Amino acid sequence: MKAKILSIIKDDEVKNWQLFLLLLVFNVFILVLWDNFVMTKEIYHVLLSTKLESYQIDNYYVLIQHYSIYNYLFIPVLLILRAVTVTMLIQLFFLFSLQNLKFKEVFKITLIGVGILLIGSLIKIGWLVTIPKEQLTQKMLHIMPLSLSNLIDVTKQDNIMIGVLNSINIFELIWLLTIGILIKLVFEVKFAKSILISFSVWSLIFLFQLGLELYFLKVLNG
């Protein structure tokens, strides 16, 4: 098992561009499912019926569909940005121990981690489509399955709290463990150190996302 992992990451049995292309196709597939099975015209009517007239909702939906192409165009950029950020953070933590890592090897580990989180997004879509559309609410669309947000009544919580609880879920835990294990195997460090690094990277990303949410909330509230 270890030899196979090392051959994939160190010996380029699977190229970074091949893995990236696979994730890109998977990401597009998830977005297509989201647009066609979750955020349907019917859902927009359910969510906005108390605020807009039916014809206004239809017009809004048409507008959203018109600009949805940009979501697909930004997928490669966001995917690269996501992977490069995590890669650089991992390398940064290793600099403290004066250990120089190959960027392409860390990048491949990061791409594997991205794949785990995308699987979580796919499962979320599967969960949402099982809920009757008339029962869906705006806050329910933000809930992550198998997260701490499933343990509370989201109707009584604000979006910031839901976001915090969503970040603590089984897929993030699998990501943390996978990154830690791969770092240990590929770069031959102690397991405690590799887990500490993956947890530190996760924590920094979590705090950054929380900071952005708080900032935009402050902007929106004036």
Image (spheres, helix red, strand yellow):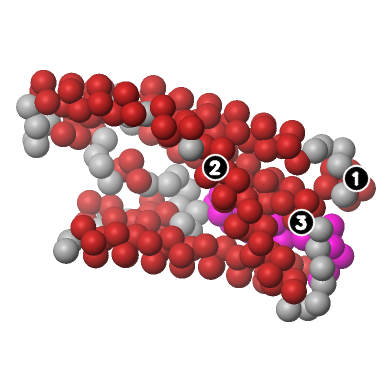
Q: Residue at x 72, y 65 (%)?
A: 91
Please identify, in this view, whether the residue under mark 2 or under mark 1 is nearer the observer.
2
Q: Residue at x 73, y 37 (%)?
A: 17
Please, is residue 6 above or below residue 24 in the view? below
Please, is residue 4 above or below residue 174 in the view? above
Q: Which residue is mark 2?
A: 77
Location of residue 106 (image quadrant): bottom right
Which residues fall within the magenta stretch?
A: 170-190
Tell me the element at label 2: helix
Location of residue 94 (image quadrant): bottom right
- The location of residue 3, given as percent across then percent down, is 92, 48
Within the magenta stretch, is there residue 176?
yes
How far is mark 3 from mark 1, CA to CA? 14 Å
How many residues crowd mark 1 within 10 Å: few (<14), some (14–19), many (20+)? Answer: few
How far is mark 2 from mark 1, CA to CA? 27 Å
Q: Which residue is mark 3?
A: 103
Query: Is 107 positioned to the left or the right of 145 in the image?
Result: right
Tell me the element at label 1: loop
Q: Which residue is mark 1?
A: 11
